[in-house]
Image: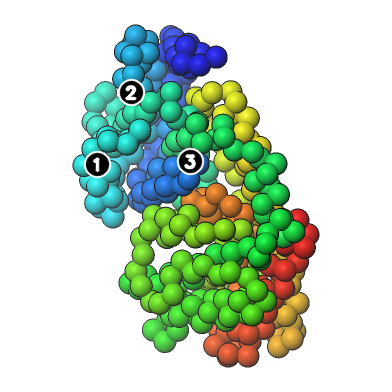
């Protein structure tokens, strides 16, 4: 079950029935206008991802084609084509697409994106990779921003097959460390990206102030702390995920945010993490052993992300009530956030209150309330590591 098995599976997808299936989706999507608005790349240690966000309702379909088994067996890359009909490329994503298209395929994989007009207007993705080296997977999801997402995953098969899942799980456990694990802290937004602002308050500043208090408390408790950014610097999302993966002895990731809403009365604290049901797999091609290991790793990471979210959320609510007795519990929720998508460890995003709510905004500006929230996060981290 090596390369021949991979090619055989792909050839099956090139049959007339697959073509009819594709034509059904394209015809079924008539009138579904959508636009490619954002592009992200996440280079992980075990997997790398190319993520495309669409406004509207995209239908991304595999286009079957005849495969040259001899060329693939002789070491040429496998090329797959995916198509989103009736899709256009928005101005704000064109520079990212240009960078993607200008990259030479010197890596083991690459993606080229083109706007086409015939036979149907839309966006074509050409994926090239070596099946001897990588497993490939195409998934869709709904983003925390409300956009529809398409993600192409490239899984490093040789590294994955060296992973001892049980040992990797144990590494997260507090008792397995000679020193307390590293907690990675991300302060949401920064630099040119202010997050929410009303002309006076800047979300990026609020996030950084609270985050620095969290870092100080964690260090006092003996944790190693790795900051995605310490100052007010502009960082592209792929730079942020690269810094996350560069942190040594990493245990967990917490992204710290404050919230905003159109309704001024909206208030409260909510925490986000990922679960498997958020992702729909449409196409998967990898060694069976690789798929099994991926499923085991994902199961552990998703489960521990949920445990971390629950522990932090519970403790933040309790400490927030010291000064904010009527704080609203907006619960632990499941939405795809880009930073969490690029992480390969238990990860959460916590929204600590609404800057658009007058009462909550006043509290969030107070150093004493920020310390209460920071203390809650630290207690949650402690609870998580004692739990697992």
Residue at x-position 33% and y-position 23%: 77
Residue at x-position 50% and y-position 16%: 2
Would you identify the image quadrant in which residue 114 lies? Answer: top left
Q: Residues within 10 Å of mark 1 (few under 14, many from 20)?
A: few
Task: Give the secondary structure at mark 3.
Answer: strand
Residue at x-position 71% and y-position 49%: 170
Task: Give the secondary structure at mark 1.
Answer: loop
- Determine the CA span between mark 1 and mark 3: 19 Å
* The N terminus - image quarter: top right
Residue at x-position 43% and y-position 70%: 229
Is there CB contact under 8 Å for labels 2 and 3? Answer: no
Q: Which mark is residue 47?
A: 3
* The C terminus - image quarter: bottom right
Q: Position of residue 250 (x, y in %)?
A: 57, 58
State the residue in front, 61 or 221: 221
Reply above or below: 187 against 248: below
Q: Which mark is residue 261?
A: none
- Determine the CA span between mark 2 and mark 1: 16 Å
Location of mark 2 (residue): 77
Question: Most extreme residue toward the right, as rendered?
Answer: 387
Location of mark 1 (residue): 103
Task: Give the secondary structure at mark 2.
Answer: loop
């Amino acid at each position: 079950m090596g390369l021949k098995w991979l090619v055989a599976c792909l050839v099956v997808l090139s049959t007339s029935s697959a073509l009819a299936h594709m034509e059904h989706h394209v015809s079924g999507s008539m009138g579904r206008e959508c636009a490619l608005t954002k592009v992200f790349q996440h280079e992980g240690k075990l997997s790398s991802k190319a993520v495309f966000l669409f406004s509207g309702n995209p239908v991304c379909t595999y286009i079957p084609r005849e495969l040259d088994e001899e060329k693939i067996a002789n070491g040429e890359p496998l090329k797959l084509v995916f198509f989103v009909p009736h899709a256009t490329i928005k101005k704000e994503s064109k520079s990212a697409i240009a960078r993607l298209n200008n990259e030479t395929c010197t890596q083991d994989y690459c993606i080229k994106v083109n706007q086409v007009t015939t036979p149907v207007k839309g966006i074509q993705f050409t994926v090239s990779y070596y099946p001897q080296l990588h497993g490939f997977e195409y998934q869709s999801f709904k983003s925390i921003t409300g956009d529809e997402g398409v993600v192409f995953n490239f899984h490093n098969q040789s590294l994955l097959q060296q992973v001892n899942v049980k040992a990797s799980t144990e590494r997260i456990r507090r008792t397995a460390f000679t020193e307390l694990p590293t907690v990675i802290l991300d302060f949401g937004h920064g630099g040119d990206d202010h997050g929410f602002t009303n002309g006076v308050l800047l979300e990026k500043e609020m996030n950084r102030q609270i985050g620095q208090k969290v870092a100080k408390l964690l260090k006092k408790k003996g944790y190693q702390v790795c900051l995605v950014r310490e100052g007010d610097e502009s960082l592209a999302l792929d730079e942020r995920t690269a810094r996350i993966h560069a942190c040594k002895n990493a245990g967990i990731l917490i992204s710290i945010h404050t919230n905003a809403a159109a309704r001024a009365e909206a208030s409260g604290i909510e925490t986000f993490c990922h679960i498997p049901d958020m992702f729909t797999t449409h196409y998967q091609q990898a060694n069976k052993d690789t798929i099994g290991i991926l499923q085991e790793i994902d199961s552990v990471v998703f489960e521990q992300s949920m445990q971390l979210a629950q522990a932090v959320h519970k403790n933040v609510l309790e400490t927030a009530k010291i000064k904010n007795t009527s704080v609203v519990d907006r619960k632990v929720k499941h939405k795809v956030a880009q930073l969490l998508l690029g992480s390969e460890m238990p990860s959460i995003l916590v929204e600590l209150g609404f800057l658009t709510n007058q009462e909550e905004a006043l509290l969030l500006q107070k150093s004493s309330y920020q310390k209460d929230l920071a203390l809650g996060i630290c207690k949650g981290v402690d609870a998580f590591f004692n739990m697992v």
